[in-house]
Image (cartoon, grey):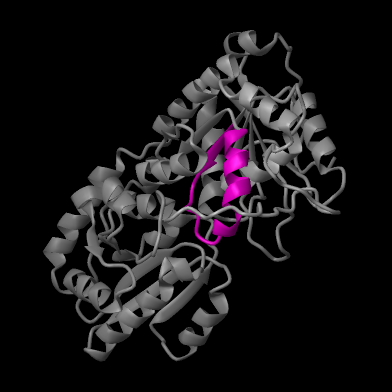
Amino acid sequence: MDRATASTQPWPWPGWADAVTQRPLRVAHFLPNMAVGGRERIANTLCTAGAAHGIAPILIGYELAAPHTATLTPAAPYWQLDRTTPDFAKRLRTLLADQQIDVIQAQGHIPACHLAQALKGWRDAPPSIATMHVGLQGTRRWLWPIRQSLRAMDRLTAVSHDMARTYSRLSGCDVSVVPNGIDTRLFAGPMPTQPASGWPFRFAMLSRLDAIKGHADAVAAADMLVRAGHLLELHVAGDGEGRPALEDLEHSRPWLRLAGQVGNPAEFLRPCHGFLLPSRAEGMPLALMEAMAAGLPCVVSDLPSLRAMAGNAVCYAPARSPAALATAMHRLIIDREGAARLGASARDCATAFGADTMAAAYARIYREVAKHRPNADLARELTRKGVGSRLVGSGNPTRMVPARGFEPLAP
């Protein structure tokens, strides 16, 4: 077994019901790896904040990170497995048994697919939870195996009501909403100041570099403002498939600055004056929470999930509209008092995004699942009928194959 961190101490094993009252609850977070990203940061935050709620966490990765990928330092004992090896399921089961795991939480719908396959047919498997962080973009071909995998979980959660509705419709199961949380203390301090006369207004973006995040729209909007004579800079943190295209744009735009992956979002945001999130789809983005907690005035896409999250504490612009985005950015640049008021409202709103609130909500769910395991019979029934998660493989035990004759659901 490929271990990445120091060992944990064995726990006495009193059984499922006693486990939730006589000792800390052992929870495993199941995710690809610890490459820098929102989901990974959430898992780390849960590991840190869960201790106050009687949770003893571990982290399990199932997919090796690409070379030179920036990774987070795990906040709990961490094991990195490789799902492409023939004995992946056996290794995972052995790890869960050795560590006496009470509940395993798949951090995402794709991790839930791999987890369902690995646990399929194992009668002593710990109860499982799947938490949905992002939508179904790019995975609609696999709706049937995703549906069956989610139905094999004992509990489903999502980070927003909009996402909960999507996955409830897909799975036919109830989906609880647990909003994301951050340690807002990391972003405390003086409110951001406005740039002095003759200095550029610094906008920040913090996300993976992917077309869905709208970086091209942000650059196009900034182009319009620069041509109109406004001084600005656009600082972009993150990495991903969109980096080469943004590097090409950076060569001809001295005001565009690519920062790469950042390990300290608070430090990255501190010298900035505004924040942009022109995404085409979102769940409950950590980057927006962090920018709001830092007191930055924010311009975000007009999406239901973001309106539910931020209310009147941010400025909205239609997604995929550089002109509308430029108008909102221009408003922040010229109306300094209005920008300051918006930043103050954002920081007030961010107080609701506490990590402890999130950790407490999950701790309650962990204990409920460990005691009752509501869908365990369904999971076993799916296994007996041979449908399971409809994941099959040859060499790779978790390669997904779409079911024949399945009609994709409408968005």
- How far across and down, in percent of the image, does residue 165 sit? 39, 42
Q: What segment is highlighted magenta in the picture?
A: 129-152
- How far across and down, in percent of the image, does residue 6 sit? 76, 36
Q: Residue at x 31, y 57 (%)?
A: 303
Count of numbered circles on the image: 0
Whether the magenta-drawn stretch holds residue 141 is answered as: yes
Q: Nearer the viewer, residue 21 or 187?
A: 21
Q: Residue at x 23, y 74 (%)?
A: 324
Q: Is residue 335 above or below residue 137?
A: below
- How far across and down, in percent of the image, does residue 56 sit? 62, 25
Q: Nearer the viewer, residue 361 or 74?
A: 361
Q: Is residue 68 above or below residue 115?
A: below
- Which of the 4 quarters of the picture holds residue 360? top left
Q: Residue at x 43, y 46 (%)?
A: 166
Whether the magenta-drawn stretch holds residue 348 is answered as: no
Q: Is residue 408 above or below residue 328?
A: above
Q: Nearer the viewer, residue 275 or 160?
A: 160
In this orientation, does residue 54 appear? no
Q: Is residue 65 above or below residue 98?
A: below
Q: Residue at x 50, y 51 (%)?
A: 38
Q: Nearer the viewer, residue 343 or 379?
A: 379
- Which of the 4 quarters of the picture holds residue 205? bottom left
Seen in the image, is 141 located left or right of residue 195? Answer: right
Q: In what quadrant of the picture does the N terminus appear?
A: top right
Q: In what quadrant of the picture does the C terminus appear?
A: bottom left
In this orientation, does residue 185 appear? yes
